[in-house]
Amino acid sequence: MKGGGKMKKILTALLLVAPMAASAQANFGINDLNGTGLGTAGLKTTIGSLLNVALSFLGIIAVLIILLGGFKWMTSQGSSDKVDEAKKLIGAGVVGLIIILAAYAIVRFVLTEVYNATT
């Protein structure tokens, strides 16, 4: 059993770290957040910021998928199966980017209209 030794090491490490994590959880409370600037923005601003972060993260993932497809195409060495796989990745990345940009436009429109309607 080669994997058994690794599993024992992982379990031992987790058992050693668990008390520290529990004490950190017990000592951390709402009062510790005072002065950090959390919770000072309005609900509309917070929702807009969270949506921008989420859509930006998805955009980065889509670009990485396109780059992975390009890398696979460059390293395919002329193999038609690998080229087809790379084309599918690039196509999926482009479609993902289009969906993300459309979602961004819709979210921006909705948030602007909600903001205008409530002020």
Image: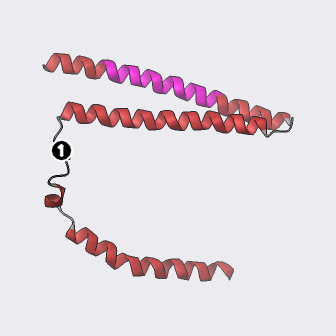
Residue at the extreme right of the image, as rendered: 78
Residue sitting at x 55%, y 34%: 62
Could you tell me residue 28's position as x and y percent? Answer: 21, 65
The N terminus, quarter of image: bottom right
**69 with respect to 114 (left or right):** right
* Dominant secondary structure, magenta: helix
Could you tell me residue 103's position as x and y percent? Answer: 42, 24
Residue sitting at x 46%, y 23%: 101
Label 1 is placed on what type of residue? Gly
Above-or-below relation of 29 to 9: above
Q: Which residue is mark 1?
A: 39
Q: Quadrant of residue 30?
A: bottom left
Over which residues does the magenta segment extend?
Answer: 91-109
Residue sitting at x 18%, y 37%: 41
**48 with respect to 15 (left or right):** left
53 and 8: which is toward the camera: 53
The C terminus, quarter of image: top left
28 and 15: which is toward the camera: 28
Residue at the extreme front of the image, as rendered: 35
Above-or-below relation of 94 to 86: above
Above-or-below relation of 68 to 28: above
**107 with respect to 90 (left or right):** left
SS assignment at label 1: loop
Q: Residues within 10 Å of mark 1 (few under 14, many from 20)?
A: few
Residue 33 belongs to the span the image colors magenta: no
Q: Quadrant of residue 76?
A: top right
